[in-house]
Image (cartoon, rainbow, N blue to C red):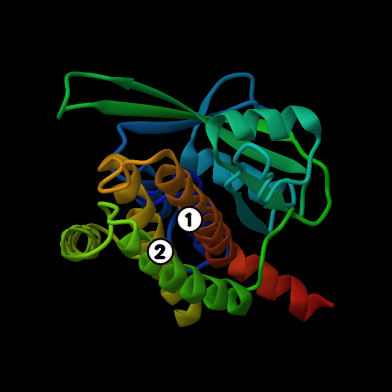
């Protein structure tokens, strides 16, 4: 969670494009981000891979009116609705985009090449059929915000007691540096998203970074097996909460539109 998922960029800027808030070229540029190129394959009516602008336009003509994010993990099919083949592909990639209005989903396949520090990533989004059903375990923005505040407080307190690297001044400095880079390089969400979604996504990324730092910096002062187990137990639910909140933020435009239509 050190950076936003590719599925988040595709869904956010794809939703802005579908709402007429950005141009196709601007949406494609934002989705690609720091990658070299993104292509889409398996699109109905196309026998070969196509570019993002063509693919998003074609999805619109196929009835797609919104895009949702899925961030599944083993034992937690977050944002997925089936069928098993799509779920398995999404779980392997650890992310996917699920279309609203037409039964399609997109799973990224990433190819990286180049030396350390100069890695180039090419992404191919595979279009697959999905089951039209409510996505699994996605909270509302309000629920996500409350859960994040509680998880951040509880995890920080417990990790500090265990003397785990990833809490305290070093982590705070790393988080501040990450947020400064993010603010210089991108918008938190695409145009059209409500301020609350931006706030939830920022907090989810902060919580996710805290978890990542705790993992990357080892066991800190937790030297006994019981302390290491307690550390892992503290990190697992907070990481899950952060993923749920990210999905809630990215999906908020579609969820709001769906509520209004009822």
Left or right: residue 201 compared with residue 35:
right
Left or right: residue 100 compared with residue 93:
right
Q: Are marks 1 and 2 in contact (CB under 8 Å)?
A: yes
Question: Residue 68 at x, y = what percent?
Answer: 63, 55
Q: Which mark is residue 35?
A: none
Q: Is residue 82 above or below residue 200?
A: above
Q: Which residue is identified by label 2?
A: 158
Q: Residue at x 17, y 19 (%)?
A: 115
Q: Residue at x 39, y 51 (%)?
A: 4
Residue 7 is at least partly visible in this image: yes
Left or right: residue 122 compared with residue 53:
left
Front residue of 97 and 70 = 70
Question: Residue 252 at x, y = what percent?
Answer: 60, 69
Q: Is residue 77 above or below residue 144?
A: above
Residue 44 is at least partly visible in this image: no
Q: Which mark is residue 234?
A: 1
Question: Residue 88 at x, y = what percent?
Answer: 69, 29
Q: Residue at x 75, y 27 (%)?
A: 85
**Rendering quarter of residue 38:** top left
Secondary structure, mark 2, is helix
Nearer the N terminus, badge 1 or badge 2?
Answer: 2
């Amino acid at each position: 969670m050190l950076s936003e998922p590719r599925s988040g960029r595709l869904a956010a800027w794809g939703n802005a494009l579908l709402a007429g808030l950005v141009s196709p070229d601007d949406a494609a540029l934002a989705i690609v981000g720091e990658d070299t190129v993104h292509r889409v394959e398996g699109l109905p009516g196309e026998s070969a891979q196509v570019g993002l602008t063509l693919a998003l336009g074609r999805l619109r003509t196929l009835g797609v009116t919104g895009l949702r994010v899925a961030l599944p993990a083993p034992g937690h099919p977050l944002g997925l609705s089936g069928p098993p083949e799509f779920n398995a592909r999404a779980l392997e990639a650890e992310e996917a985009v699920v279309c609203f209005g037409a039964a399609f989903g997109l799973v990224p396949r990433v190819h990286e090449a180049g030396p350390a520090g100069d890695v180039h990533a090419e992404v191919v989004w595979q279009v697959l059929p999905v089951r039209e059903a409510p996505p699994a375990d996605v909270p509302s923005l309000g629920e996500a915000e409350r859960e994040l505040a509680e998880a951040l407080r509880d995890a920080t307190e417990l990790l500090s007691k265990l003397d785990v690297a990833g809490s305290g001044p070093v982590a705070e400095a790393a988080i501040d540096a990450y947020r400064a880079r993010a603010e210089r390089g991108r918008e938190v969400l695409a145009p059209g998203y409500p301020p609350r979604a931006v706030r939830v996504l920022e907090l989810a990324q902060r919580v996710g970074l805290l978890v990542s730092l705790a993992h990357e910096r080892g066991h800190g002062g937790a030297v006994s097996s019981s302390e290491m187990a307690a550390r892992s137990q503290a990190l697992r639910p907070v990481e899950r909460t952060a993923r749920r909140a990210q999905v809630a933020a990215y999906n908020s435009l579609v969820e709001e539109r769906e509520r209004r239509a009822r």
